[in-house]
Image (cartoon, rainbow, N blue to C red):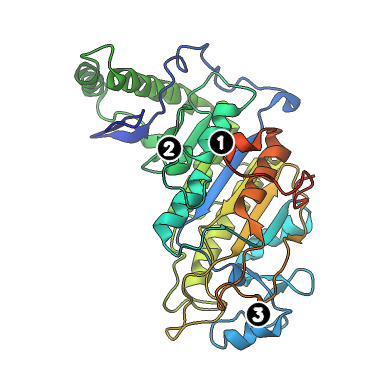
C-alpha cells in the first residue's frame, strides 16, 4: 500500500523519498546561492534523534545529589575535581567530560539543557516510544504523519524548493512523513545516478520510462519529482563548500550527517527543517563512566555538534538545534554495569533565540518516593511542551494544536528556554 510517497533505489541512485505535492517542483525554481540579506533568511530547525534511549543522568549529571553516586557505584561519572570528573555547570548539574566540546556554547548562552523531559506514555518499547515521539501523539498509533511534517504543512511561509524538509539517511523517518514535501538523502555526493555520462543518461531515461508509463499515476508523478530533485541538487553542488571557521567534523556517520546539513544551509536552498539520527545509546551492558562505550558515543556526538555550530558561525542566529531521545535509563545501574530502560532523560536546545547557560525543567530529585515506578527519573516536562516552545519561539507557530493534536501548552511562558 502506497503512503503518498515512493521509495526508489537502483544502482547509483540514492534512496529518496518525496511527499507528494504535485506543484512543488513546478513553482518558480529556487535560485541556488541567491545571497539573501541576513534579515530575510529563513529560520531553520535541525532535529537530532538519539535513538536507543540515551542516559540523561550521564549526559547532564546531577552530581550534587548524593543518591546518584550511591545508586551507581561503578558507572557514575567521578566527582568534580577528580581525574575524568564531571564538568560543573551550576553546583548541582554538570557535563559528562566527553561533552566538553559543548561547554563553550553553554557558557556563552548558546546552549541550554532540559532535564527530566520525556513522554507521558509509560511504554518501555523502543519502537513504540520512538513512534510516539515522532508522531507527536503519545499512545496513539493511528496518527498518519509526523509532527515535523505537520509543521511544514502549517508553516506560514512556503519556499519554492523541494528541500524544505530534509532527512539525512537512507529512509525518510516517521517524523517527516506526511503531505508536505520532504526528502531523504543518504549522502549529498551520492544523490544521483552515477556512471559514465552516456550510461548515466541512458539509465535516467530507462527509469523514467519504467516509472512514467502511466502519466496519471501517483508513482509516475512522484518519480518525476525525484528526477527533478536530483537535477536541482546537481546544480546546487557548485555553491556548496567545505566547513567554515576552522570547523572539523568527526569522520563518523553522524559527523558526516551534520556536515551535510551545514552544507545545505550554506547553499541557501530554502531548507526549513533538517533531521538526523545518531544511534548506539541502548547501554544495557558495560555502559562505562568517564571512559567506555557511552563516553565514546558522547565524544562523537559532542564533536559533531560543536563542529556544526562552529561551521555555521553567525548563521546559528537563524538556526535552532534540538536533540531528543525516546526515553532515559534507570537511576540505578544493573548487574552488568549498564542501565535499563527508564523514563525521563535530557534534551538539548542550542542556537537561535535560545536562552542558554542554564539547565531547565523541574528537577524531581532522585529520592525513591519521587521516582517513576519506584526506579526511574520521573517525567516533569512533557516532550511536547519543549517541542511546542521551540516551534512557537523560533518559527512563531501559533496553532500548536495543529502540530500536536490533543495537546494544550501549560502556559504561554512555558519553560523559558527560548527568549
Q: Which residue is mark 2?
A: 144
Q: Is residue 393 left or right of residue 191?
A: right
Q: Tell me the SS state at disc 2.
A: loop
Which tag, 1 or 2, sits closer to the chain's start?
2
Q: Which residue is mark 1?
A: 273
Q: CA distance from mark 1 to mark 2?
A: 19 Å
| Image quadrant assignment for residue 62 | bottom right
Relative depth, front residue between 403 and 22 = 403
Location of residue 75 with respect to 20 vertically, above or below: below
Label 3 Cα neighbours within 10 Å, binned few <14 / some 14-19 / many ≥20: few
- In the rendered image, is residue 264 in sight? no
Mark carried by residue 184: none
Q: In front: mark 1 or mark 3?
A: 3
Q: Tell me the SS state at disc 3.
A: helix
Q: Is residue 271 left or right of residue 222?
A: right
Quarter of the image that includes the N terminus: top left
Instruction: Where is residue 258? Give x, y as percent.
Output: 53, 46
Mark carried by residue 369: 3
Which tag, 2 or 3, sits closer to the chain's start?
2
Instruction: Where is residue 221? Give x, y as percent.
Output: 33, 17
Q: CA distance from mark 2 to mark 3?
A: 38 Å
Instruction: Residue at 57% x, 40% y: name it.
Output: 405
Which tag, 1 or 3, sits closer to the chain's start?
1
Relative depth, front residue between 217 and 268 = 217
Q: CA distance from mark 1 to mark 3?
A: 40 Å
Q: How many marks?
A: 3
| Image quadrant assignment for residue 78 | bottom right
Q: Is residue 8 left or right of residue 27?
A: left
Instruction: Residue at 49% x, 44% y: name it.
Output: 135
Q: Residue furthest front?
A: 406
Label 1 Cα neighbours within 10 Å, binned few <14 / some 14-19 / many ≥20: many
Amino acid at each position: 500500500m502506497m503512503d503518498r510517497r515512493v521509495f526508489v533505489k537502483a544502482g547509483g541512485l540514492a534512496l529518496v523519498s518525496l511527499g507528494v505535492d504535485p506543484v512543488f517542483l513546478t513553482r518558480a525554481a529556487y535560485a541556488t546561492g541567491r545571497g539573501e540579506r541576513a534579515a530575510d533568511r529563513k529560520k531553520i530547525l535541525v532535529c537530532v534523534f538519539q535513538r536507543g534511549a540515551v542516559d540523561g543522568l550521564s549526559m547532564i549529571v546531577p552530581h550534587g545529589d548524593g543518591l546518584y553516586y550511591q545508586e551507581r557505584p561503578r558507572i557514575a561519572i567521578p566527582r568534580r575535581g577528580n581525574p575524568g570528573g564531571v564538568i560543573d555547570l551550576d553546583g548541582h548539574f554538570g557535563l559528562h567530560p566527553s561533552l566538553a566540546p559543548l561547554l563553550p556554547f553553554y557558557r556563552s548562552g548558546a546552549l541550554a539543557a532540559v532535564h527530566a523531559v520525556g513522554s507521558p506514555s509509560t511504554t518501555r518499547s523502543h519502537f513504540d516510544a520512538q513512534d510516539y515521539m515522532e508522531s507527536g501523539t503519545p499512545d496513539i498509533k493511528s496518527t498518519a504523519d509526523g509532527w515535523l511534517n505537520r509543521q511544514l504543512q502549517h508553516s506560514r511561509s512556503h519556499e519554492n524548493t523541494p528541500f524544505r524538509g530534509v532527512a539525512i539517511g537512507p529512509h525518510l523517518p516517521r517524523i517527516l512523513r506526511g503531505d508536505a514535501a520532504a526528502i531523504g538523502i543518504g549522502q549529498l555526493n551520492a544523490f544521483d545516478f552515477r556512471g559514465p555520462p552516456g550510461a548515466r543518461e541512458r539509465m535516467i531515461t530507462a527509469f523514467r520510462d519504467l516509472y512514467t508509463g502511466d502519466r496519471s499515476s501517483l508513482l509516475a508523478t512522484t518519480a518525476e519529482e525525484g528526477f527533478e530533485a536530483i537535477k536541482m541538487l546537481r546544480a546546487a553542488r557548485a555553491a556548496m563548500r567545505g566547513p567554515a571557521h576552522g570547523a572539523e567534523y568527526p569522520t563518523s556517520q553522524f559527523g558526516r550527517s551534520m556536515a551535510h546539513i551545514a552544507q545545505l544551509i550554506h547553499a541557501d536552498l530554502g531548507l526549513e527543517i533538517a533531521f538526523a539520527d545518531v544511534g548506539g545509546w541502548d547501554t544495557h551492558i558495560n555502559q562505562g563512566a568517564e571512559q567506555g562505550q557511552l563516553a565514546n558515543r558522547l565524544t562523537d556526538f559532542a564533536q559533531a555538534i560543536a563542529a556544526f555550530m562552529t561551521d555555521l558561525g553567525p548563521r546559528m542566529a537563524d538556526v535552532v538545534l534540538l536533540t531528543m531521545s525516546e526515553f532515559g535509563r534507570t537511576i540505578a545501574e544493573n548487574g552488568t554495569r549498564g542501565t535499563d530502560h527508564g523514563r525521563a532523560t535530557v534534551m538539548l536546545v542550542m542556537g537561535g533565540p535560545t536562552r542558554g547557560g542554564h539547565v531547565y525543567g523541574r528537577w524531581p530529585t532522585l529520592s525513591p518516593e519521587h521516582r517513576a515506578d519506584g526506579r526511574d527519573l520521573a517525567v516533569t516536562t512533557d516532550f511536547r511542551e519543549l517541542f511546542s516552545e521551540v516551534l512557537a519561539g523560533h518559527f512563531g507557530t501559533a496553532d500548536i494544536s495543529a502540530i500536536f493534536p490533543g495537546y494544550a501548552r501549560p502556559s504561554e511562558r512555558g519553560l523559558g528556554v527560548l527568549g
